[in-house]
Amino acid sequence: MPRLSALFLALVAALSGPAMAFQPLIPLDVRPTGTPGTFEVIESRGAGPSHIWCVAADHARHSLNATGTQRLTVVAPLGASQTKQGSKAVTFTLTPPDAATTNSVTPGMLGGALLSVRSDGATMSVIQALQYCSDHIEMP
């Protein structure tokens, strides 16, 4: 049922045009930290690392107008939220658009089995992190 709800939200957002605010594919709360390009993804609903990376990339792309080659980096691993008391969160930062980037991922993150939000410094491009979103969409 959660997959169907996520798909419905994505469809409504796509069809409603600019009048409706952007809705992520996976409905996790994203909150700014007060530092430009830095934000928290609040863990909830049993979200795992792939959900969190997907939401971070989705937010970077649609709310921060990030390019696919910009990099997301974990600056505070999963722990107490800075912005929502009593919650756990992962804090990400987005490289500036003009920063030199590569398409590499942090060693140990390939394949998803070792994908983690529990260590600072983990990094990947926005486009790579968006690939985790397809894992959470039910296809006909």
Image (spheres, rainbow, N blue to C red):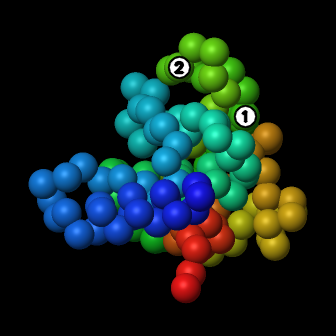
Determine whether 127 is above or below 109 in the image: below
Q: Quadrant of the N terminus?
A: bottom right
Question: The residue tagged with tag 1: helix, strand or loop?
Answer: strand
Residue at image point 23% right, 69% down:
15
Q: What amino acid is found at the position of numbered circle 1 in the picture? A: Leu
How packed mark 2 is, by other alpha carbons closer than 10 Å (few <14, some 14-19, many 20 or more), is few
Q: Earlier in the sequence, mark 1 or mark 2?
A: 1
The Cα atoms of the two marked residues, 1 and 2, are separated by 13 Å
According to the picture, the residue beneath numbered tag 2 turns out to be: 84
Quick one: which residue is furthest to the left in this view?
Answer: 19
- 137, 125: nearer the viewer: 137
Residue at image point 68% right, 46% down:
47
Quick one: which residue is furthest to the bottom in this view?
Answer: 140
Determine whether 79 is above or below 19 in the image: above
According to the picture, the residue beneath numbered tag 1 turns out to be: 78
Q: Which mark is residue 51?
A: none
Q: Quadrant of residue 34?
A: top left
Where residue 32 sits in the image (x, y, percent)?
42, 32
- 24, 80: nearer the viewer: 24
Q: Is residue 66 visible?
A: no
Residues at marks 1 and 2 touching, judged by CB atoms closer than 8 Å = no
Quick one: which residue is furthest to the front in this view?
Answer: 1
129 horizontally vs 34: left or right: right
- 30, 44: nearer the viewer: 44
Where residue 105 sits in the image (x, y, percent)?
71, 66
How packed mark 1 is, by other alpha carbons closer than 10 Å (few <14, some 14-19, many 20 or more), is many
Q: Quadrant of the C terminus?
A: bottom right
Where residue 53 sits in the image (x, y, percent)?
62, 55
Q: What amino acid is found at the position of numbered circle 2 in the picture? A: Lys
